[in-house]
Image (tube, grey):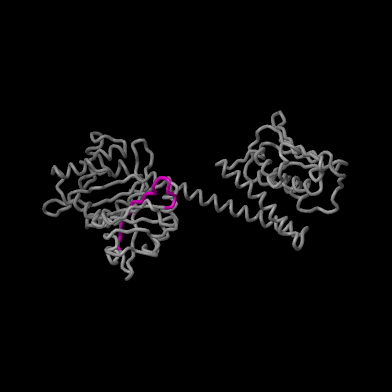
Amino acid sequence: MNKNIQPLSDLDLWPGGLLVMDGDGMIIKTNATLRTWLGQDSAAQVSGARFVDILTRASRIFFETHLRPILIVEGAFSEVSLELERPDGSRFGVYVNAERPNGQLGVAYFCLYRNEQRQSFERELVERRRESDEFRILVDSSPHAIVSSDRFFRIHAWNPAAEQLFGYSKEEVLGQRFDLLLIPEDELDELHKRVADVIAGEVLRSETLRLHRSGQKIHVERSFAAIRDENQTHAGFVTMYSDISERKKAETKIETLLHEINHRSKNLLSIVEVIARQTARSHAGDEFLPVFSNRLRSLASNQDILLRSGSTHVDLEELARAQFTHLEDVLDTRAKLSGPPVHLNESVSQAIGMAIFELVTNTAKYGALSQENGGVKLTWEITTGENPDLKMYWLETNGPPVTAPTRTGFGSQVTGLLLESTTSGETRHDFATDGLRWSFTAPVENLT
């Protein structure tokens, strides 16, 4: 438990629910108000329960797939509607604000308000007389955009938050129809179909799109209700809008990241399957696992570089150096690397990284680096011209005599056919008397 979390005993009289959750999703603290709402002993702390255990199934899924990632990425979310479930199965709605303290990746603080409070506030807005001083002060100071109109949708009240959200001044909109001014054309039919229900007393709440003065569509959460006069006769409408554009951007960002993670995971699993199958063909028994593990480490080093770079491209020199990390005191002494900066895309970096790793492994076991005075040079260059190529050269010196392999193993494939098919390039193996000479050429446009 985090020792910096202060006891909540002083906050047990707080009219809202308070809760602290640790990084594993376990409830650390609750206040008496929340425990009372949940039908629990108000004097006893909740123990051994996860936060999702007090949510309904639908709210649990929404929290895990949307809200928790938002909390991790953005650090907070506010005014999100969730349903809580008591041990007896009964449910009640709350609005939730959550924040992750700076520097504490796991701990999160939650403040919960019963839905009835906000619904009461909305009813109060529509029941108060429009021209009362209390109503004007309330509307003008509200952080939500509030638009009031007569029963023909002609605007007669437009608060400062509406000016900020939609870009129109109060003077510009008074007397105009808000349905024609703010609502996208393809949503007008839906609004007009629901008007009868709203007049009958329903408060229409939903996430939707509205138009800014510039013509740009804005993501909003809206509450749409009818206004009645002293005789309870329908006199108009009041609509409250909250800007949820940032939340939608965060949700889109998270969805994109999840799709990217899924795509990359499938690609990596496919590559691992190929490595396992090809390694098994040439290494049996106890020899299989060490070779397979080394090849996976080469693949993992490429992913580490991607994460450190914060992008989908890898620097060629950094990638090449990573393939020598399992050999001590070799780089910059017996192994020389040089060439201009080249940034490779993800699939190409995996292919080139695996090829270099195979070259490094083979020279350490059978080639120049297996000899005390042997050395290796890996160089690359970019040709000039309208369609430049990347040319890479692997040169071993002072190594033992080498001969061409009698069969095509995994090493030959990753330094040959597999690399060529990934890059539309060409490779060449020259088994010289003092060590292997290997070259690779491919169009730059296929690599970056």
Whether residue 199 is in magenta: the answer is no
Identified at 55% across, 51% down, the residue is: 261
Extreme residue in the bottom direction: 88
Horizontally, residue 331 falls left or right of residue 111, namely right
Q: Nearer the viewer, residue 37 or 146?
A: 37
In terms of image quadrants, where is residue 85? bottom left
Q: Choose between 145 and 394: the one closer to the eye.
A: 394
Q: What residue do we see at 61% from left, 47% from top?
A: 303
The location of residue 67, given as percent across then percent down, is: 41, 53
Out of 208 and 161, give the one closest to the viewer.
161
Q: Is residue 236 visible?
A: yes
- Between residue 97 and residue 206, name the one nearer to us: 97
User: How many marks can you see?
Assistant: 0
Residue 94 in the image: x percent, y percent? 30, 57
State the extent of the magenta-drawn residues as a range.
92-106
How far from the left and from the top, in percent, is residue 103? 43, 46
Give the residue furthest to the left: 231
User: Which quarter of the rendering shows the C terminus?
Assistant: top right
